[in-house]
Image (tube, rainbow, N blue to C red):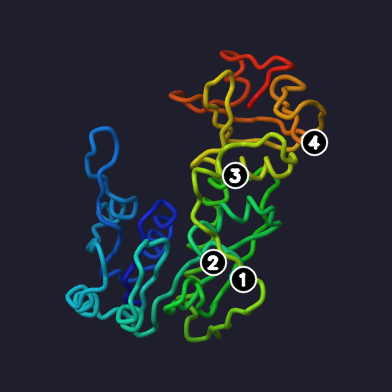
Amino acid sequence: MRLVFMGSPDFSVPVLEALVTAGHEIVAVYCQPPRPAGRGKKERLTAVHARALELGLDVRHPVSLKSEAAQKDFASLAPEVAVVVAYGLILPQAILGTPTYGCLNIHASLLPRWRGAAPIHRAIMAGDAETGVCIMQMEAGLDTGPVLLREVTAIGPEETTLQLHDRLSALGSAAIVKALDSLSGLTPVTQPDEGVTYAEKISKDEARIDWSRPAEEIDRQIRGLSPFPGAWCELNGTRLKILASRLSEGHGAAGEVVHTPAYVACGTGAIELLRLQKAGSQAQDISEFTRGTPLPKGTRLS
């Protein structure tokens, strides 16, 4: 099909690659503009921008699609369909109505659960047993459009947001190719009014660990916020990110190391710390971390 691709971060790159491999004609790639990053504040391309250039595709990065000029530019491409995945800009009705078959969004949840910005984080933090991807016909509302195709996958008991992110990206890539291959035969299914939840953007205020909470909640917080922004606590006044964990058994004061190498008591139950990162240092697996920073029994994390 003749299509426009609209996406920006790492999550979107495998989708772009899958569409190219499937032989679709990508007449343009839309992504977020380059922005200053790093200590030198040098402008950095989005992951999609960089990959699209490598693939020899036409890249466009308007700061908005609300102007008449931007909308005319989009319409001049005469796309049959637009594929949208984590683009980052609101699509006005003039854009939504331009492609022959509309704009199809790949959303990383089982809609109507977790509409919004952070569905992968929220699914893990809420303790959901499963999630998936939906191919949705976009409309003006926030992730409210009818669903054309959905794929379901279980969430692993030790899975982090990064790990699930990569799996859902691959799942979405396969799903959109499947959807485009059979687009005329798919029946849009209106989302039910029941079961709607919103995946609010992750706040750094959510990252501080309160060891008085149950182990199940802390474990989900750690895995759901890994790798960014990273759940954290303090060890002897130094910030310590915890990037991987699993549920364990143990009893003690909240935040106390009750077994080595790093089994920590919570309000109820305990968790085993698997991957840590000191401020200003590289992330390390627990065996490597404790060689340089032992965590003997009785150590307190706050």
Q: CA distance from mark 2 to mark 4?
A: 32 Å
Mark 4, secondary structure of its residue:
loop
Crowd around label 1: few <14 · some 14–19 · many ≥20 (10 Å): few
Is disc 2 in contact with disc 1, using a CB cutoff of under 8 Å? yes
Q: Earlier in the sequence, mark 2 or mark 3?
A: 2
Residue 46 position within the rendered picture, expressed as x and y whole percent measured from the top left: 31, 51
Q: Is residue 49 left or right of residue 228?
A: left
Query: Amino acid under label 1?
Result: Val
Q: Which residue is mark 4?
A: 269
Give residue 160's mark.
Answer: 3
Q: CA distance from mark 3 to mark 1?
A: 24 Å
Quadrant of the drawing holding the C terminus? top right
Q: Is residue 43 left or right of residue 108?
A: left
Crowd around label 2: few <14 · some 14–19 · many ≥20 (10 Å): many
Give residue 196's mark.
Answer: 1
Height in image: 6 above or below 201? Answer: below
Mark 1, secondary structure of its residue:
loop
Query: Amino acid under label 3?
Result: Thr
Q: CA distance from mark 2 to mark 3?
A: 20 Å
Crowd around label 3: few <14 · some 14–19 · many ≥20 (10 Å): many
Residue 2 position within the rendered picture, expressed as x and y whole percent measured from the top left: 31, 76
Residue 158 position within the rendered picture, expressed as x and y whole percent measured from the top left: 67, 42
Query: Amino acid under label 4?
Result: Gly
